[in-house]
Image: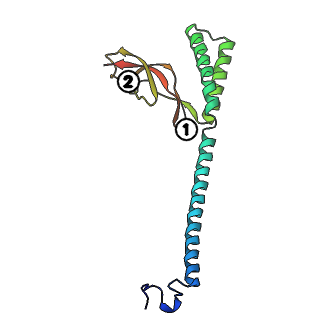
Amino acid sequence: MTDNPTIPEDEMLNGEPSALEQTEKQRDEYLSLLRQVRADFENAHQRNRREREQEQKFRSERLALDLLPVIDNLERALSVAKEAGDENPLAQGVALVHAQLIDALKRHGIVALDVLGKSFDPNVHQALMQQPAPEREPGSVLQVLEPGYTIHDRVLRPAKVIIAAS
């Protein structure tokens, strides 16, 4: 009788496992390695798919960042025309171009933040100053100096705001 109880004596050759047992052990190691490689491959495939989806979803981000100053200038032009009471065709044309640009951005998931009167949130607001406002709740947005935008619920540009002081 030998010291190894798992291997019968007739399968031992000079105290070594038989060729069959060595082959089975090697097979089990290869199967384990194959399963691990397969799992790694499937994980890499899923990660690659998620990255492609994210890239597709946010592909308009850089273009939008370049267009936001254009939108800001169109809004300034419309504001000046409105203050002057100017309803000429040029002002109407600027308003139409502005609306088309906003609609095009919306189709790509880019929308302006609605922040006026809401509580200050450093994730979506950039406070430029505080003003006393006894009629308003402290920390609420009093005025939007530059609108903020999101792309698919991710902040593209925070809104620059004035908040009510306590």
Tell me the residue at 61%/13% (across/down).
77
Residue 115 showing in the rendered view: no
Q: Tell me the quadrant of the picture where the C terminus can be found.
A: top left
The residue singled out by tag 1 in the image is 152
Q: Tell me the quadrant of the picture where the N terminus can be found.
A: bottom left
Residue 8, relative to residue 143: is it above or below? below
Residue 96 locus on image (x, y percent)? 66, 22
Residue 107, relative to residue 116: is it above or below? below
The residue singled out by tag 2 in the image is 140
Looking at the picture, tell me which residue is in the foreground, 122 or 6.
Answer: 6
Looking at the picture, tell me which residue is in the foreground, 163 or 39.
Answer: 39
Residue 6 locus on image (x, y percent)? 45, 85
Q: Are marks 2 and 1 in contact (CB under 8 Å)?
A: no
Q: Amino acid at mark 2?
A: Ser
Residue 85, relative to residue 111: is it above or below? above
Left or right: 37 in relation to 122: right
Left or right: 34 in relation to 93: left
Element type at mark 1: loop
Element type at mark 2: loop
Q: Amino acid at mark 1?
A: His
Tell me the residue at 49%/24% (across/down).
159
Q: Earlier in the sequence, mark 2 or mark 1?
A: 2
